[in-house]
Amino acid sequence: METNDIQQTILDTIKRKLPDGKKLSDVIQDDLNVSSDAAYRRIRGDVALTIYEAKILSEKYNISFDNVGEFKKDKVIFNYKPLKSIEFNFESYLTNLRDNLREIKKVKNPHIYISVNDTPMLQLFNFPHLTRFKFFFWAKSYLNIEEYQGVKLAYEKIDPKILQIGIEAHNIYNSIPTSELFCPEALRGVLRQIEYYFDADMFEGTDYVMGLLNNLLELSNHLKHQAEIGHKFVYGNEPNTALNTKFNMYYNETYLPDNTYYIEHDEGAHTFFTHNIMNTITTSDPTYNKDTKMILDRLIDNSTLISVTSVKERNKFFASLNRTINNFKKRIELEMEIVD
């Protein structure tokens, strides 16, 4: 049975059981503790019932749930898109990110909490060629996709259609308030990947390598500028200080083990994880989300807020990052001189 059919069956069954004068929208609003607008969106099918919402309604109104699955203590259900259904190309990768952000933007008063253990992917959109490099590296070196084998990474103009998708995704991200945790590894992973490709002669010419490193420096400085004012904006544009562009940047001096995206909004919460390199898994399980938020809150409590405040700590963080990037740039420049 398809998800939409299950949802419609549940709602139709509840409607038949309601006493005269009782509205389905009121019932959904009360039973699921959601707003009137959220209730209507579920009734219309614009928003799918989570499996836990379906469980609540099915148990209360004695609706058979055998066709949907079992709910067991200490079990969490994640949604994901199987790898075989994902097209591995730059356009589909950006489209998937943009569409996920669009769904987040639709909910009321969203706020995204992000733990960044290396690459702030959504900030990478400021520099499309860095995003392109990251995708190429994943596809070639991690996933061994056939069309990328035996091919060196060379500079090429990004297709306008693909660029537009990236711009759309970035604009949506910039319009959602975020609290983001960074650690000493921030952007070092990207730098090591560039270094690996340089050492393995996987770039078609050194000019592109230098361009990517310059992009990394520009990204670092742009992140610092956003942290200084506490708001996100597109690189090269004037800062936007609207409430929905709020950027809380925290620095954790230890290590963040994964990239976690926790979305909090008026109707509930969702947790996203990066998974299998280019995939994501997500859950709306309330207990799991509560635990995730608890861990993020503890990480934040043990971190330093370096946006707007803590000038010294902010300057130290970015000075160290820029020094690391510049040291590698000097190494490449020296090797280029030796070759000449």
Image (cartoon, helix red, strand yellow):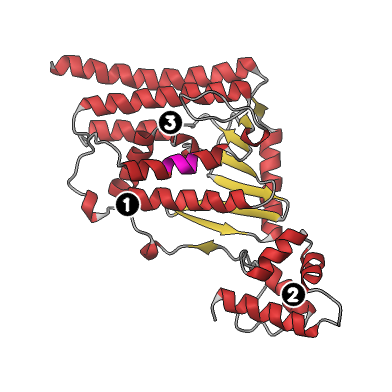
Q: 126 or 84: nearer the eye?
A: 126
Q: How many other residues sit within 10 Å of disc 1, few (<14), some (14-19) or many (≥20)? A: few
| Furthest-front residue in this view | 21
In terms of image quadrants, where is residue 279? bottom left
Q: Is residue 159 left or right of residue 202?
A: right
The residue that mark 1 highlights is: 89
Q: Is residue 184 above or below residue 84?
A: above
Q: Is residue 33 above or below residue 235?
A: below
- The quadrant in which the N terminus is found is bottom right
Is 123 one of the magenta-colored residues?
A: no
In terms of image quadrants, where is residue 192? top left
Question: Amino acid type of disc 2?
Answer: Leu
Name the residue rendered at 42%, 42% in the picture.
166
Q: Is residue 50 left or right of residue 20?
A: left
Q: Is residue 336 left or right of residue 166?
A: left
Which mark sits nearer the N-terminus, 1 or 3? Answer: 1
Distance from disc 2 to disc 1, alpha carbons, whole Å, reads 41 Å
Is 167 one of the magenta-colored residues?
A: yes
The residue that mark 2 highlights is: 57
Q: How many other residues sit within 10 Å of disc 2, few (<14), some (14-19) or many (≥20)? A: some
Which mark sits nearer the N-terminus, 2 or 3? Answer: 2
In terms of image quadrants, where is residue 167? top left
Question: Amino acid type of disc 1?
Answer: Asn
Name the residue rendered at 68%, 35% in the picture.
300
Q: How many other residues sit within 10 Å of disc 3, few (<14), some (14-19) or many (≥20)? A: some
Distance from disc 2 to disc 3, alpha carbons, whole Å, reads 48 Å
Q: Is residue 318 above or below residue 200?
A: above
Q: Which residues are magenta?
A: 166-170
SS at circle 2: helix
Which mark sits nearer the N-terminus, 2 or 1? Answer: 2
